[in-house]
Image: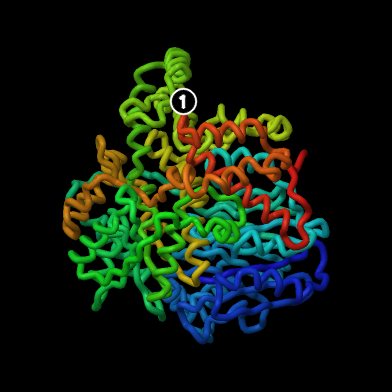
């Protein structure tokens, strides 16, 4: 697990500045505190920061083949590298190390761009092929590891594991994308393949990009997608057995390391499943860690202790202070782009705790997307029943009107908070789902964003992104469709981004067995009724895990990994919100209607409306504006028009 950086001249093999490449590379010391390296020749510079996990002495990068015609810089882990190594040795390739990086070097020499189809792992990589004068970029299938790239005016392509790497180049444009503003205030993050900056992109999960000197900028190519191809009909008992066997295989792959290894344990179904399977594969107690909150509404640690006691796990617990918002500025530096998931704070803390004892930790991320575990899937299924019963010509006007006139009862018991559901039912499948996951509903975005931003959008709305993804989805089932949308947006844009930045801040590698691509492919083909049955998400996963874990752990109400933002905003954060959201920087940015910013804060502080996620999103955006304006060599932030 590491950080990568680089410069590639698409026009001519001109000299690359060693000082600039080193400067770009050194922005990621946190991702690779164990070492660094660069490779420079005319027209190309590759950088690497190393976190040593496998072959501690021999895996230094960038790594070249024997005649230095192929050079690789790589972030991640290839779990099947040993099998690839044996296959490549049989074809005559000679290995000098025991690292997974060398399997990429020779794998590219043998299979070219198709090498990524042979890799099982998480990765962002760059391969320079001197003979073909090409730079090959690739990202893993699910987007576990990040990869940013952009072009500067002289035709040079910059790339790196984080946006801050590219921002070290003085010629990189700083114009803020109006589409990204619309998307950020919809999702709480900027979905792939866009970034907050115009002209800078994230390589989308399951895609490659091949740049050839002397040719123009090509489009990325997709090499994998979640298939959702129906598998053979099996009995529940057989499915349970096969599920555990396949998940255990994914866990076993991720337990290969030459450094101490442990796990996150929240006490939820997914992390408990991973720890249970690790326990069966280990000859000593698994080392796990968990975060405790003082507020019982947000505290799951008693469940983590219950699982640990049941499995004989060594559990380290640390309580997070009730007012643990000191990380605001620090998290902004880590995430680069505006990022509105407040659970980044406890994630940062649990990664710090884990790193005190281990260098690699396994997590349960991906279980909800695979097995329809989020509550919103259940609500979506209910809404779809109404949509099937009533045609859009009746449903749209009827429920649209009911949604508009029904009061917004943020403080009322849940049973009376029907406004959002009514509004969702009045929309079609994708529009209804987007309405449910948006942190800023579309009518609020219309009032919040300035006339200039709305004009620069040229008609674009975030629903266009969902519509395009839905059109390419390999499934017609409504539940599978929204799972697919989450695989393409929420999983890489929010969940995996959160964990990558928080773990890398502490030099910790996090591995995700539920996102083994072979496991994802298999689960996607399991009948949706085995995932979501009535009110029960993760139906077949829970049934299978009754062989490993107590039923009261598996069937308790899902809590999530949240922080008490609402109380913070009306208490210790109130002054900061006033200064930030209603301050000069936000008002003068040209992105917002200042009167609406003031209204949002006043309504929330007075207790008339609950704008918690909205205000948090604004607070994070203001922090981003401050950083981009103060950045070295940065021009003032502005909307990029045209």
Residue at x 74% of width, y 63% of height: 632
Depicted 103 relative to depicted 198: above or below: below
Whether residue 392 appears in this view of the structure is no
> Which of 112/120 is in front?
120
- Residue at 31 percent across and 28 percent down: it is 415
**Which of 169/146 is in front?**
169
Q: Point out residue 495 in the picture as x, y percentages from the top left corner.
A: 46, 53
Q: How many marks?
A: 1
Q: Position of residue 328 (x, y in %)?
A: 54, 56
For numbered disc 1, what is the local secondary structure? Answer: loop
Could you tell me residue 184's position as x and y percent?
58, 43
What residue do we see at 37% from left, 27% from top? 417
Residue marked by disc 1: 428
Q: Viewed as shown, does residue 334 lie left or right of 588?
A: left
The image quadrant of residue 63 is: bottom right
Q: Is residue 391 left or right of residue 378?
A: right
Q: Which quadrant is home to the C terminus?
A: top right
Residue 588 coordinates in the image, percent (x, y): 73, 41
Q: Would residue 356 be found to the left or right of residue 547 on screen?
A: right
Where 444 sits versus 554, above or below?
above
Q: Is 434 situated above or below 634? A: above
Residue shown at the point (24%, 70%) measured from the top left: 313
Looking at the image, can residue 490 be seen? yes
Q: Is residue 58 above or below residue 361?
A: below
């Amino acid at each position: 697990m590491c950080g990568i950086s680089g410069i590639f001249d698409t026009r001519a093999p001109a000299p690359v500045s060693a000082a600039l490449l080193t400067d770009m590379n050194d922005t990621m010391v946190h991702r690779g505190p164990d070492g660094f390296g660069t490779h420079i020749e005319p027209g190309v510079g590759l950088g690497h920061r190393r976190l040593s996990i496998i072959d501690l002495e021999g895996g230094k990068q960038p790594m070249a083949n024997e005649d230095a015609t192929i050079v690789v810089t790589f972030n991640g882990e290839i779990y099947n590298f040993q099998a690839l190594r044996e296959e490549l040795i049989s074809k005559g390739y000679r290995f000098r190390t025991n690292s997974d990086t060398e399997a990429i070097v020779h794998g590219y020499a043998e299979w070219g761009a198709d090498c990524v189809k042979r890799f099982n792992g998480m990765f962002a990589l760059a391969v320079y092929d001197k003979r073909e004068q090409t730079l090959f970029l690739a990202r893993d299938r699910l987007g576990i590891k990040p990869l940013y790239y952009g072009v500067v005016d002289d035709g040079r392509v910059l790339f790196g594991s984080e946006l801050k790497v590219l921002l070290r180049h003085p010629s990189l444009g700083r114009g803020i994308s109006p589409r990204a503003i619309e998307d950020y205030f919809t999702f709480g993050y900027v979905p792939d393949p866009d970034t907050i900056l115009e002209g800078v992109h994230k390589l989308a999960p399951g895609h490659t990009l091949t740049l050839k000197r002397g040719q123009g900028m090509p489009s990325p190519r997709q090499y994998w997608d979640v298939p959702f191809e129906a598998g053979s009909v099996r009995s529940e008992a057989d499915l349970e057995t096969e599920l555990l066997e396949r998940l255990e295989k994914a866990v076993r792959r991720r337990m290969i390391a030459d450094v101490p290894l442990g796990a996150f344990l929240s006490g939820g179904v997914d992390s408990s499943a991973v720890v249970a399977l690790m326990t069966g594969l280990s000859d000593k107690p698994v080392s796990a860690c968990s975060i405790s909150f003082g507020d019982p509404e947000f505290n799951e640690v008693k469940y983590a202790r219950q699982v640990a006691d049941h499995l004989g796990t060594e559990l380290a617990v640390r309580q997070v202070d009730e007012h643990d918002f000191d990380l605001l500025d620090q998290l902004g530096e880590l995430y680069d782009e505006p990022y509105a998931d407040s659970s980044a704070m406890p994630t940062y803390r649990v990664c710090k705790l884990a790193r005190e004892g281990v260098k690699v930790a396994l997590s349960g991320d991906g279980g909800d997307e695979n097995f329809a575990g989020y509550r919103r899937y259940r609500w979506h299924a209910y809404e779809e029943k109404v949509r099937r019963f009533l045609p859009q010509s009746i449903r749209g006007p009827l429920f649209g009107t009911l949604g508009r006139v029904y009061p917004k009862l943020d403080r009322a018991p849940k049973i009376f908070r029907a406004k959002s559901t009514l509004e969702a039912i009045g929309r079609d499948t994708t529009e209804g789902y987007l309405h449910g996951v948006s942190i800023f509903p579309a009518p609020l975005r219309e009032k919040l964003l300035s006339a200039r931003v709305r004009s620069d959008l040229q008609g674009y709305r975030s629903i266009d992104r969902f519509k395009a993804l839905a059109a390419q989805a390999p499934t017609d089932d409504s539940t599978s469709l929204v799972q697919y949308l989450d695989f393409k947006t929420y999983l890489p844009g929010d969940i995996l981004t959160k964990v990558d930045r928080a773990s890398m801040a502490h030099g910790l590698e996090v591995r995700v067995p539920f996102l083994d691509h072979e496991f994802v492919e298999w689960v996607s083909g399991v009948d949706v009724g085995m995932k979501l049955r009535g009110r029960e998400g993760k139906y077949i996963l829970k049934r299978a895990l009754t062989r490993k874990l107590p039923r009261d752990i598996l069937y308790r109400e899902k809590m999530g990994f949240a922080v008490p933002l609402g109380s913070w905003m009306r208490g210790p954060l109130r002054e900061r919100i006033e200064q930030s959201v209603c301050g000069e920087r936000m008002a003068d940015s040209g992105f917002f209607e200042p009167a609406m910013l003031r209204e949002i804060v006043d309504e929330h502080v007075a207790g008339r409306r609950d704008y918690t996620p909205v205000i948090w999103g604004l607070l994070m955006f203001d922090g981003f504006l401050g950083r981009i304006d103060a950045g070295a060599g940065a021009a003032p932030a502005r909307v990029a028009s045209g």
